[in-house]
Image (tube, helix red, strand yellow):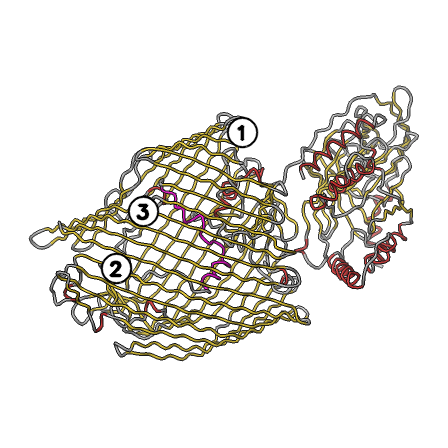
Amino acid sequence: MRHYILWVAFLLPFAVMPQTTISGVLKDVKGAFITSASVTINVMGINGNIIAYDISDDKGNYRISFKHPAEKVQINVRSLGYEYISEVLINKSQIKNFELLEQVTKLNEIALKFTPITQKGDTINYLVSSFQDQKDRVIADVLKKLPGIDVLADGKILYQGKPILKYYIEGIDLLEGRYNIANNNLPADAVAKVQILENHQPIKLLDSLVFSDKAALNIKLKKKVTTTGVAKLGVGLAPLLWDVNITPMLFTKKRQMITSYQANNIGNDISSEIKILTIEDLLDQFESKNEKQDWISIQLLSSPPFAKNRWLNNNANLFTTNYLVRLKKEVDLKINLSYINDFQRQNGNTKTTFLTQTDTINIIESTKNKLFFNVLKSEFVLIKNTKKSYFKNTLETNNFWDAQKGFVIANNEALNQNATIPFSSFSNILKQIKPIGKKLVTINSVVTYNNDNQSLKLSPGQFKELLNNDNPSDILNQYVMHSNFYTNNAFSFTKRIRKMTFTPKIGFNLQNQKLNSHISLFEDKNENKLTGSFQNNLRFNQTSFYSILNTQYRNDNWKIELETPFKLQTFDRIDDTLNKKQNLYRFTFEPRLSINKPINAFWETTFSSSLKNSFGSINQLYYGYILNSYRTIQQFDTPILESLKRNLSFSISYRNPIKSLFINGYYSFENSNQNLIFGNIINSNGTSSFGFIEQNNNSNSHHINLRGSKFFSKIKTTLTLTTNTLFDNQIQILNGSLTDVNIKNIELNGKLDTKFTEWMSISLKTNISISNTKFKNQSFRNILTQEHLLNIDFYPSSNQYIGFDAEYYKNNFSFQNNVSYFLNLNYRFTFNKSKTDLALNWNNILNTKEFTTAFNESFSYLQSTYQLRPSQVLISLKFRF
Amino acid sequence: MKKIICLVLLLTFCFNANSQNSKKYGYEVIYNLNFQPDSTDASTTQKNIHFTLLIGDKISIYAENNKIKLDSILNGIESGNINQNYVLGNLNSMPKPFTQAKILKYFDKQEIIYNDNLSSQNYEYTEDLKIGKWKILDNKKNIKGYDCHSAEIEYGGRKYTAYYTDQIPIQDGPYKFNGLPGLIISISDSKGFFQFELIGLKKIDSFNFKLLKSIGEKINVSKKEFYKLRENYMNNPIPFMEQEGAVFNDNNKKLIRDIFSKKRKKNNNPIELTY
């Protein structure tokens, strides 16, 4: 009852308010009815609220009834093609006819704003043309500017801070992760779109069964059949410089090919062109254990902490061909071949000043190094990837014929170093998945064999106290022979039960390694082959039997993955000559859990936790001495390194392609426990060296990463900000005692790319890193390094481009010359109506010749210089076809 | 793709030349639609689907941009302007619309004609232009330089809030929405499943009447019949396809049924829940 009274009280004013009806006819001057006109009754004032409205019918009639307390109201009549009428009326029922004058109605048009980034489900499309500058020639130039995408200095592409899983061209993986060759040479003009495929599962058969949280990148070309590529010929001074690149490419539905010949001596690191950059392919390589191992080396100079092409003194040739052909339906054959030949030089000086009570002693070392690289790699892949079956077999051979020559003069005493570092490997990786009934059966098999026969020759010999009772020797030879056989075979099946996918897996792996080494001293051509602890005849055999259950749960809101691997591992380490051995049996359990939850279309969180055991590898297990370089000689007469790592990580990401905003944050904590401790060890003969001693110890590290990038479409600017923070706590041996070491490292990065006018674009990159090391409670000075790169490009006309690069590097750890500047000038002229560019590059205009670092210790002062590339001018012609 | 765009442009010009009888004004409005096909999963949201509303004197046509492009090509084949083999050879680069629906609003006849395809058969139903009663609200907003007023309507089992501007006296909007004293600039349902927003407006000199034409024979049905047919089609598309002369073996039938049942599960959120 009370309700009714309330209602009545509320409605009373309206009930008393009389209803007003305004009606009439709309006609034009000629008397024709005006249909479809909007007639509104508004509250008085500019843009007053609409009280009621009607639309005139085919007889021009309108009729509006309303109740409103105001004394006066406004009537507005609007129709396209007629003038706009607004009149004030007394709020009472009346007939109001209007005669409308014809008038062109001009509406403010709304221009369709181009959406450069669009999203359809898991696919994000970037329209290349809206990010491409006049100077951008190849697709890598454009990728760098896409929000959400980063390209690292080595060419690695990151999406939302994580490396991409696959690099496809028209959905085909031609390059098996060696995507720089395409990225650096595929003309951006040939590309329509760059696509990011989120949650990408590269094996089609597993698509709805095994989820993935990784992203792949796909290049969509403008044409279905594309023959394209670049050719470049550059010459310059001084000395005589060249830069040659011929890279033809072909993309059709059934065939893809990228072939390249490149040669330069201008400091461009050619090997990065064929470096494997995708995680999956890198893991494959890691899993096949065929990576090159260098047991010995000459003493290399530590390279300056900035861009390679400022200091790399090279003379390199690369030939690579990558060919894919569709043999029959869905079966592809891929052939990837490459050969690199490179000759590099390193020149530098080190000056060490010792302060004694009475005197100062100066030691001046001058180093001249020559490095020879000869690498032949071949890979044959047969792949079938359909929704019904998966088969991939990779046959890979790698051959290295590397050599190094080093020449050091220290206080007028010369030292020659000669190293030959060959390596050859063969591996076969097979993976097959077949559906049998409702299950998927997977077979994995890896077989690898590699061997190397390396040697280092020093003249005169070193470490005479240790090796030759303090007697000098003319020549010292270190020989190392190593061979490795590895196989890993596993069988698993995948079964989906509702929203769960189970993959139990069983398998075994086997690794047999042999390491033989000895040292020979030569005095007047008489060989003295050292025995005892200066040789190794080590056999190291590992076996592992494992059973893993992988469980994935996925519904619309959650993705959960749990992996529970049990492993039985054995290690046999035996050296018959030195009469030493160790056997180790371990049963390990290494669970891993990851939880992924998309909160909505924009936000996503991931949590993961894992436990991981690792064991020492053969290069930390030899009982006898090996001379690794003229300054280091090492033996590892300690047990096998065992460590257990616990990891916790949490990440949150936000991506909004409509607003072109990408943000993500990441935190991880790692605790590691191991049985050996690294540090400075005093040997029995009084010398000291770095190595391990037995002592259980713990280390903890925290890592926080925050990253955001946004594209401002109005001013055509992409802004990216990143911070990286690392806290690390570990124990080390210093001067014979255990010391708590705390390391703090903070890195700030900013990147700005803008082309807000057609004739200029600016890119600014800045990187500041602060690190602090604390021993016990003694804190050292903060080490601060700064790196600022500014790049301003002008486009005075449509076929010209002038660019200035300024680079500034600063650190606070060296005393002198802690600042380095570089200035470069680039000019390019494009011949009209052709795809030919004439380019002029003047690098290092200021002719900065050396990079110097200096360190101060309590009784010594050390200063080292590295010879940089001098000021150089290069003129080149570049064709795109 | 480029070739097809060229063709589409070329065809548009051809039609323009033909349509001398078009009225002296016309507007082309582009709406952006974000929608969530699966009401239980926000991650299925489809963004940036563009629709064109072509407004003539007494008629307007509303369809997805890709549908308009596709129709232009198909019309071109029918009239012999485009070589059929060329299209067949470039099926992959043909525009792929999310919806084949076309909505024609006849302001003189006060009716809406809804035209859609089930399989490749064309169906059409008619409903009243007046789709419901708008409730005028006092909210105001300036959107893209236009002063907009707000209004509410219930239609097809959903409650929508619209912003319209009386500065543009066109009583039209996206989908079937119309009847406000100005053009609808944005409209979305209370749950945010369907969000239409005007992103482009320009005057056009002529009106492409070819778009009124449906491709092939059409069948006139009632709205109820259409929804019944659509449900049957989604549940079992085979008879529809067989009616059109397609022949399947059992394997293919199963495959098609699987595809459609997956589709049905994901597309559980049609714009009209009641009809």
Where's the N terminus of chain A, which quadrant? bottom right
Q: Of label 3 and label 1, which has the lower sequence position?
A: 3
Residue A632: name its quadrant. bottom left
Q: Amino acid at mark 1?
A: Ser
Residue where numbered disc 2 is placed: A456
**Distance from the alpha carbon under mark 1 to that under mark 2:** 54 Å
Chain of residue at mark 2: A
Residue reaching furthest right?
A59
Which residue is farthest left?
Answer: A358
**Quadrant, the C terminus of chain A:** top right
* Mark 1 Cα shell of 10 Å, populated few (<14), some (14-19), many (≥20): few
Up-down relation of residue A673 to residue A323 (above or below):
below
- The residue tagged 3 is A344
Furthest-front residue in this view = A525
Of residue A520 and residue B1, the one placed in the foreground of this image is: A520
- The question of residue A839 being in magenta is answered with no
| Residues marked 3 and 2 touching at CB (< 8 Å) | no
Q: CA distance from mark 3 to mark 1?
A: 37 Å
Q: Main secondary structure of the magenta part?
A: helix
Q: Mark 1 = which residue?
A: A834
Horizontal relation, residue A138 to residue B87: left or right:
left
Examine the image and state in which quarter residue A443 appears: bottom right
Marked residue chain, label 3: A
The image position of residue B22, as x and y in percent, is 84, 28
Name which of mark 1 and mark 2 comes first in the sequence. 2
Q: Disc 1, disc 2: CB below 8 Å?
A: no
> Range of the magenta residues?
A267-286
Image vertical order of residue A523 relative to residue A814, above or below: below
Secondary structure beneath dot 1 equals loop
Q: Describe the element under mark 2 as helix, strand or loop.
A: strand
**Is A633 located above or below residue B145 in the figure?**
below
